[in-house]
Amino acid sequence: MIPSNPAPFRPLRSLFAGDPEMRELVSEFAAELPERAGQIARHAEGRDAAAVMRLAHQLRGAAGAYGFPTIGESAGRIEDALRGLDNPGRTRALEGLRTQIEELAGLCDSARAGAPISHSRSPGR
């Protein structure tokens, strides 16, 4: 369902966006973010709560390291909602996480859109 007044799309930028030494790393990481969010969504649809928790945990840490704390916090909320539950409880909890997973996917898309353009170095440079 599309909201009647969707929020304007704003690219999400890394805290390291202005750091020339991090530019390429941030760009590569941001390019992978929609796929990472997609993996979480696919595992949630498949009711694989253990995989969702593992992937959310990995994204939580990596996002912070690449200067995307908002993405890390979003992934952390998903991980925290599943932590401490037994497998049947985790599977039931997945149903209530749809909104958070969609939010995470939107943040990942925004980060990809806001990533600095990477200019790969040519060999020998």
Image (cartoon, helix red, strand yellow):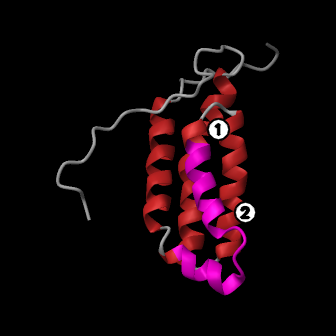
Residue assigned mark 2: 54
Q: Position of residue 9 (x, y in %)?
A: 33, 38
Q: Secondary structure at mark 1?
A: helix
| Front residue of 105 and 81 | 81
Among the 4 quarters of the image, the one containing residue 90: bottom right
Residue 36 seen in render: no
Q: Residue farthest to the right?
A: 124
**Residue under the point 69% across and 22% down:** 22
Q: What kind of secondary structure does the magenta stretch mostly adopt?
A: helix
Q: Which mark is residue 48?
A: none
61 to 3, vertically: above or below: above
**Residue under the point 71% across and 73% down:** 50
69 to 90, vertically: above or below: above
Q: Residue farthest to the left?
A: 4
| Front residue of 77 and 65 | 77
Label 1 environment density (alpha carbons within 10 Å; few <14, some 14–19, many ≥20): some
Q: Position of residue 79 (x, y in %)?
A: 65, 61
Among the 4 quarters of the image, the one containing residue 36: bottom right
Q: Which mark is residue 29?
A: 1
Mark 2 vs mark 1, foreground winner is: 2
Q: Position of residue 29 (x, y in %)?
A: 64, 38
Q: Earlier in the sequence, mark 2 or mark 1?
A: 1
Q: Position of residue 35 (x, y in %)?
A: 57, 53
48 to 75, vertically: above or below: below
Residue span colored magenta: 71-94
Among the 4 quarters of the image, the one containing residue 56: bottom right
Residue kind at label 2, given as amino acid type: Arg
Q: Secondary structure at mark 2?
A: helix
**Residue under the point 44% across and 58% down:** 102
Label 2 environment density (alpha carbons within 10 Å; few <14, some 14–19, many ≥20): some
